[in-house]
Amino acid sequence: MMIGKLKELTMNRDGSQNITITVHSDFRETYDELANGDIRIDIKKYHPLRSLDASARAWVIIDEIAEKTGERKYDVYRKAIQDIGGVYDIFCGEEAAIRTLCRNWRDRGEGWMAEITPSKLPGCSNAKLWYGSSVYDSKQMSDLIDSLIQEANNLGIPTMSPKEEERLLAQWGKKYDKKKAKQQKTDGQEHSST
């Protein structure tokens, strides 16, 4: 994932558009690799990455749910990931390639799930690939924790009050802002020395 800012949008006479994006990371090597072909573009509003405290909080709730229900904790975790939405991509490709993609995807960790479904294209399959929480931004992690809290409440498991949860989320944001400022300062020093 790369963080940047949209700088300019211009229209060409043929109706196509040019988008200018400013990034803080060194993009030269990637640019050289991608410059002459079609690329896939996915521009989304930036949300800061979640903190490790958020992950620890999620796993406490997961453990409590697993203990109460008798489910394996990783099954509780995977179900919560599937319940929140917005943390998966769907790909279509040749059946053998999709099987390989899914096998490799699942090897990334417990939350990295893959489901193969038939495609309307002959000889092809679809893969629905869920991302594990290790790459969630703060909003996605908040959605995951909210889903887990709702499940815990449905089971009669006590959790934080909304006010306590709000305070904890604010702390995660402050920690991220400090880390981001420190990283930008470091990046700025590296660029000024080159």
Image: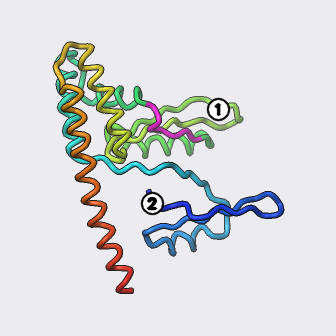
Residue 157, image x and y in percent? 18, 17
Figure quadrant of residue 187: bottom left
Badge 2 element:
loop
On screen, 90 above or below 33?
above
Tell me which segment is drawn in magenta: 85-91
Q: Is residue 192 magenta?
A: no
Residue for badge 1: 119
Residue for badge 2: 2
Residues under labels 2 and 1: Cα distance? 31 Å
Looking at the rendering, in which quadrant would you find the C terminus? bottom left
Q: Which of marks 2 and 1 is nearer the N terminus?
A: 2
Residue 141, image x and y in percent? 33, 39
Foreground: 93 or 38?
38
Figure quadrant of residue 170: top left
The residue sitting at the right extreme is 14
State the residue at coordinates (64%, 32%): 119
Residue 57 shown left or right of residue 102 in the figure = left
Q: Do the residues labelled 2 and 1 touch (CB within 8 Å)?
A: no
Residue 156, image x and y in percent? 20, 13
The amino acid type, in three-letter code, at marker 1 is: Ser
Crowding at mark 2 (Cα within 10 Å: few <14, some 14-19, many 20+): few
On screen, 50 above or below 118?
below
The amino acid type, in three-letter code, at marker 2 is: Met
Residue 120, image x and y in percent? 69, 31
Badge 1 element:
loop
State the residue at coordinates (44%, 60%): 3
